[in-house]
Amino acid sequence: APPSPSLPKTSTTTSTQLYIIGPMIRKMREKEDKKNMPMADAAEARSEAPGLRVGANAWKWPPVWPYDGNFFKREVEMNAKANANPLANPMQMMMGGDAPDANGGENSTDVSFDSLKFWGEKSEVRTELDERVAEKITNHYSFYLRDGMSVLELGAADNSYLPPTLKLNKHVGVGAVQSQMDANPSITSSLIVDLNNVIDDDGVDSAEFGELCDEGFDAVIMANTIDFLNHPREVFKSSWRALKPGGVMIVPFLAKDAYADKFDEAFTKQWRDMTDDQHMWVCGSFFQFSAGEGWDGLKGFDISPDDARKESDGNMLSKLQQNNDSDKPCGAFVVQAKKKFMEEEVDENDVEGFIGSRLWMMPALEDRDKKLVAPRLARAYDALTSQDDKDRMVQHFGSLPKIYASLIKMDQFAFTFSMQAQLAADLLGDPDFEGNDLQVNNMKMGLGLRKPSKDFWAPVGKLTAAMTPEEKVNLLSYIVPRFGSGDAAQ
């Protein structure tokens, strides 16, 4: 008898595939659903524009600026540095070579990216957003912008995506290409500024832009620009200064693949390496580490159209799905916050709050340092008995960056961050401390950051060798203000 026909192999294979692939798809969907769950309560969402994803209380930050210098460099800059550094070979380092310098040095070559030149050469290229995405940005703006407002737009080009019925009192565009801003019907005046030219830890390096910021704006908008910034913290510092108290900064951005074919060369490393979800948190960190608690109500939104294509997470099924979604619009997101009101005078019932506001934009101090030194400064202020001494202490807050510029060089294990904060507070709490160069130089000698003077600091160092670090801080905070006090006896 002829053998019984075997079952078709395709049936067995299909069943096996379904057995394996079915749970995979389900797991992927569960993971996607979990990722898309909003981190904001319903009450908060009701008072905001649609799409609230990250509420004001959901953000978590490290104590210091978490990015190295390479994080905001472009591919051409990274490649040039890698090719120019002979010590990038791990084996060579093991044989006695020095580690490559991540921030540049004698073994690295910096290749600067000329932003104004790049965008000038791209002056005829338009972003051309999908109309569904553009509508989402417009709708978001319409929720927060009102007639009669003054608006500063950073990264301005030919289209601001503002509601067509919005009647602004003033709309100043700051961009890289004059012809594009001239073609923008909403802009009332414009200024060419390279937002990547900055003063470290301070802001955008442009006198005209600084004068513009002094005018005070109700809103700062910056759409599709953070992907090209080399120094975002400084740009956000300038934006904070430009806002009136209570003013809002709104930062829309698109999925990382939105216009890679047009402007790929200008993307920074963070934009290339991070996912769209991570971009929202990175953008939030620019607010946090520019003015800290000087920003209020930091929120993140996913305003993507309902049929937006999903970002690939690297697996084969996700990539296939992304190929099938090529005709769908890209994702769109927004991060925004308001500028807090800063008290002009000391509130005796909340001295720490007043001092904290004075530290919002202070350079040289990390967020960690501000949180440590503010309560200590408040206690030092309360300990003063004379109003003149209290006023003098407030006037000398500006010397904190000079103090911390030295303290950051100390060994954090031998001289902890808490001890650094205590020294800074004790110095400012002394009526004779002005933060002048003579006092700062003597502080450095007392800390061992400069060669000690033979007639004073060298013998003091020997006499105090057995003292505890805390005792040395107390003594140093008493001695340093005596220098440069103008009192001959001291």
Image (spheres, rainbow, N blue to C red):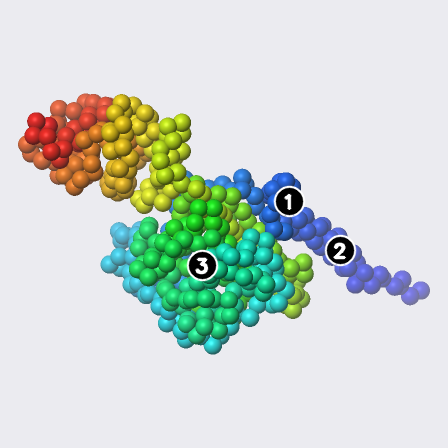
As drawn, 233 above or below 409: below
For residue 46, which numbered disc appears in the image?
1
Q: Amino acid at mark 1?
A: Arg
Q: Secondary structure at mark 3?
A: strand
Kindly identify the residue that appears in the image at 47 percent across and 62 percent down: 171
Q: Residues within 10 Å of mark 2 (few under 14, many from 20)?
A: few
Residue 406 location (% of width, % of height): 24, 40
Kindly identify the residue that appears in the image at 91 percent across and 66 percent down: 2
Circle nearer the N terminus (1, 2): 2
Residue 63: name its quadrant.
Answer: top left
* Left/right of residue 423 with respect to residue 125 in the rendered view: left
Screen quadrant of the C terminus = top left
Q: Which residue is mark 2?
A: 18
- The Cα–Cα distance between marks 3 and 2, rounded to whole angstroms, is 55 Å
Kindly identify the residue that appears in the image at 10 percent across and 30 percent down: 487
Circle nearer the N terminus (3, 1): 1
**Furthest-left residue in view?**
455
Residue 145 location (% of width, % of height): 54, 55
Q: Which residue is mark 3?
A: 152
- The Cα–Cα distance between marks 3 and 1, rounded to whole angstroms, is 27 Å
Q: Amino acid at mark 3?
A: Leu
Say which of 317 and 470 sits in front: 470
For residue 230, which numbered disc appears in the image?
none
As drawn, 280 above or below 272: above
